[in-house]
């Protein structure tokens, strides 16, 4: 890419008005237009340069930025550095689209890029810890092997399109403010392919593409969440006539794990302990995501209390320190007592200053009926 001061390129002073810039551009565009200078690459280069200069100076914001920084190199999105303003955009700006044919053989490419595709994978919650490699199966369009993608039976050489002489483009002359300009559009006879097909390929119905079941193995990083997407470049539908393949977007779905509730990096689990464990305290083994964990339940633990085991949760995306596991405790009340247990519990109640009443029928049902009377 040329790097030039846009004022210099258009030959205007820094304080030039918008009209002065416009008329300087018109004058130079007429002079250097490739139709006026066929086969002269330096004229084409110059034509590009003035187009780029005009793109900056005709845009008050860009012009102000250039003025402030003094050098195109310092421009945050420097159109001279490539990637900014495309020549074709500029041309469209002046000539109303349709691209430009500069009298050479540079017809528009008939390449068609393949579409992007989407696939879904399900992974287990435990896979989120270390990440996992998974194979994704999906259907995509690939170049037809029978015709090599040209759509003609057996890959026979198709007939050159007579409407466009095989260029895929047809030209027309349009009158614009810089004079007559030839613009080109896609050939309607061959849809831009440059050829017509007498015997269409049966395998692909002359489309050049066939559907296939394919698979690709992807590396899922640690810490992912449901709904996140991985991008696999070039694994979408294949293109035609040299077009690029599309990309594959893999949508992740982390399966629910009955044991855990997930809140980002934090996991929540439930732990049921007995009355005695709650009252006396205990060391309890908790079922962690990847390992058994020891939890010290202190004496006097209440139902619903939550304990935190640090670092037993999930890592952030792409790995790092794991979040915490929170353990919500419930206390199991025995639904059935045998004689000894009942005796001891009643003793316990009396030791607490209560006056427990022996249920008449004994057991839970008797207790219920008595309470309801
Ligand atoms: Zn085919
Ligand atoms: Zn044609």
Image (spheres, helix red, strand yellow):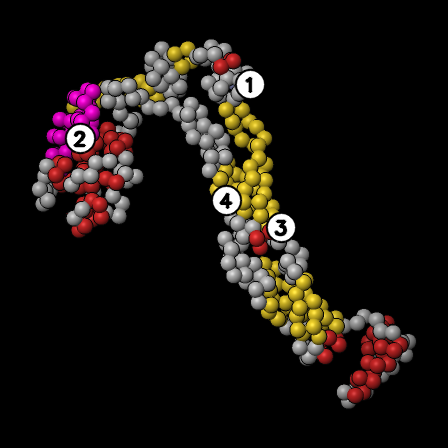
- Range shown magenta: 19-46
How far apart marks 1 and 4 lie (CA) works out to 32 Å
* Residue labelled with disc 1: 203
Residue 222 is covered by the magenta coloring: no
How far across and down, in percent of the image, does residue 312 sit? 59, 63
* Residue depicted at x 60% and y 48%: 123
Mark linked to residue 160: none
| Mark 4 crowd level (few <14, some 14–19, many ≥20, 10 Å Cα) | some
How far apart marks 1 and 3 lie (CA) works out to 40 Å
Can residue 241 be seen here? The reply is: yes
How far apart marks 2 and 1 lie (CA) works out to 49 Å
**Label 1 CB less than 8 angstroms from ligand 1:** yes
Query: Image check: 346 left or right of 82?
Result: right
Counting residues from the N terminus, which is met first, the one under dot 2 or under dot 1?
2
* Residue labelled with disc 4: 230
How far apart marks 4 and 3 lie (CA) works out to 16 Å
* Residue depicted at x 17% and y 30%: 46
* Residue labelled with disc 2: 46
How far apart marks 4 and 2 lie (CA) works out to 43 Å
Label 3 near label 1: C-beta < 8 Å? no
Mark linked to residue 124: 3
Counting residues from the N terminus, which is met first, the one under dot 1 or under dot 3?
3
**Label 3 CB less than 8 angstroms from ligand 1:** no
How far across and down, in percent of the image, does residue 152 sit? 48, 14
* Residue depicted at x 85% and y 78%: 342
Q: Residue furthest bottom?
A: 353
């Amino acid at each position: 890419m040329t790097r030039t001061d846009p004022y210099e390129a258009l030959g205007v002073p820094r304080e030039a008005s918008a009209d002065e810039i416009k008329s300087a551009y018109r004058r130079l565009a007429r002079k250097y237009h490739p139709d006026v200078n066929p086969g002269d690459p330096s004229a084409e280069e110059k034509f590009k340069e003035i187009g780029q200069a005009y793109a900056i100076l005709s845009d008050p914001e860009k012009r102000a930025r250039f003025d402030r920084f003094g050098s195109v190199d310092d421009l945050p999105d420097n159109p001279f550095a490539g990637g900014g303003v495309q020549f074709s955009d500029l041309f469209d700006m002046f000539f109303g689209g349709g691209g430009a044919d500069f009298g050479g053989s540079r017809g528009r490419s008939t390449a068609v890029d393949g579409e992007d595709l989407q696939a879904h994978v399900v992974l287990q919650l435990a896979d989120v810890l270390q990440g996992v490699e998974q194979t994704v199966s999906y259907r995509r369009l690939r170049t037809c092997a029978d015709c090599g993608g040209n759509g003609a039976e057996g890959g026979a050489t198709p007939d050159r399109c007579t409407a466009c002489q095989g260029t895929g483009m047809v030209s027309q002359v349009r009158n614009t403010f810089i004079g007559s300009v030839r613009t080109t559009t896609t050939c309607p006879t061959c849809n831009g392919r440059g050829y017509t097909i007498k015997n269409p390929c049966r395998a692909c119905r002359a489309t050049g593409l066939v559907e296939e079941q394919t698979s690709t193995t992807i590396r899922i990083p640690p810490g992912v969440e449901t709904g996140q997407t991985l991008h696999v470049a070039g694994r979408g539908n294949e293109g035609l006539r040299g077009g690029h393949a599309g990309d594959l977007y893999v949508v992740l779905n982390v399966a629910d794990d009955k044991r855990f509730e997930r809140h980002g990096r934090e996991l929540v689990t439930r732990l049921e302990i007995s009355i005695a464990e709650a009252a006396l305290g205990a060391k309890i083994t908790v079922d962690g995501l990847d390992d058994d964990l020891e939890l010290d339940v202190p004496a006097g633990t209440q139902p619903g209390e939550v304990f935190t085991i640090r670092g037993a949760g999930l890592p952030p995306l792409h790995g790092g320190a794991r979040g915490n596991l929170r353990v919500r405790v419930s206390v199991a009340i025995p639904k059935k007592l045998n004689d000894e247990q009942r005796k001891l519990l009643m003793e316990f109640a009396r030791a607490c200053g209560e006056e427990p009443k022996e249920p008449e029928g004994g057991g839970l049902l008797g207790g219920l009926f008595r309470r309801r009377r």
